[in-house]
Image (spheres, grey):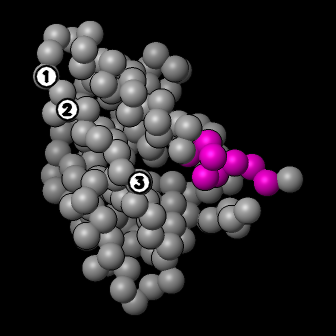
Amino acid sequence: MQTEPQSVLFVCSENALRSPMAEAILKTLRGDRIFIDSAGVREGALDPLAVAVLAEIGIDLARHRPKRLEDLMDSSFDVVITLSPEAHHWALQMTRATAAEIEYWVTPDPSAVEGNRAVMLDAYRSVRDALMARIGTRFAPGP
């Protein structure tokens, strides 16, 4: 079993949907014990479908304000979880001289799905559910 980290950073391309979803989910599960933040490599705008699918499970993402990595007050994290190839490349460069543990979680970009609102919501729910399962397993409370 892995030791519980004191701080976790989720990083994706724009901090618009994948990383804020992961941040909000982990904060709901373990935010009382772990410092959790998220950021993007580039500037982005919060995705309203990400807000909608988290609201379905009682998590409020509406107040999230996307930020870039340069906007972080602290860049020292025990675990950095990247959710896009671009973010993973950046994290490897950023943490060369630190003891941060880097994990790459292949996470599809649901905003790339085409179709009507129902089809798109299903894609976002799939990402939400996959993140919940992965986070629940990775950050399960210890004995």
Is residue 62 in view from this perspective?
A: no
Categorize mark 3 by other alpha carbons within 10 Å: few (<14), some (14-19), many (20+): some
Q: Are marks 2 and 1 in contact (CB under 8 Å)?
A: no
Q: Which residue lies at the image location 79% right of the left edge and 54% below the top edge?
A: 142
Task: Return the residue at label 2.
Answer: 111
Label 2 element class: helix
Residue shown at 30%/25% (left/top)?
123
**Contact flag, marks 3 and 1 (Cβ < 8 Å):** no
Residue 116, quarter of picture: top left
Q: How far from the left and from the top, in percent, is residue 89?
A: 25, 70
Spatial distance from mark 2 to mark 1, Cα to Cα? 8 Å
* Furthest residue toward right: 143
Region of the chain picked out in magenta, as a range: 135-142
| Residue beneath the point at 28% across and 79% down | 93
Q: Position of residue 40 (x, y in %)?
A: 26, 55
For label 3, the residue is 105
Report the amino acid beneath label 2.
Answer: Ser
Query: Any magenta on residue 140?
Result: yes
Label 1 packing within 10 angstroms: few (<14), some (14-19), many (20+): few
Instruction: Tell me which label, 3 or 1, sits earlier in the chain.
Output: 3
The amino acid type found where label 3 is placed reads Trp
Q: Which quadrant of the figure has residue 28? A: top right
The answer to whether the residues at label 3 and label 2 have Cβ atoms under 8 Å apart is no
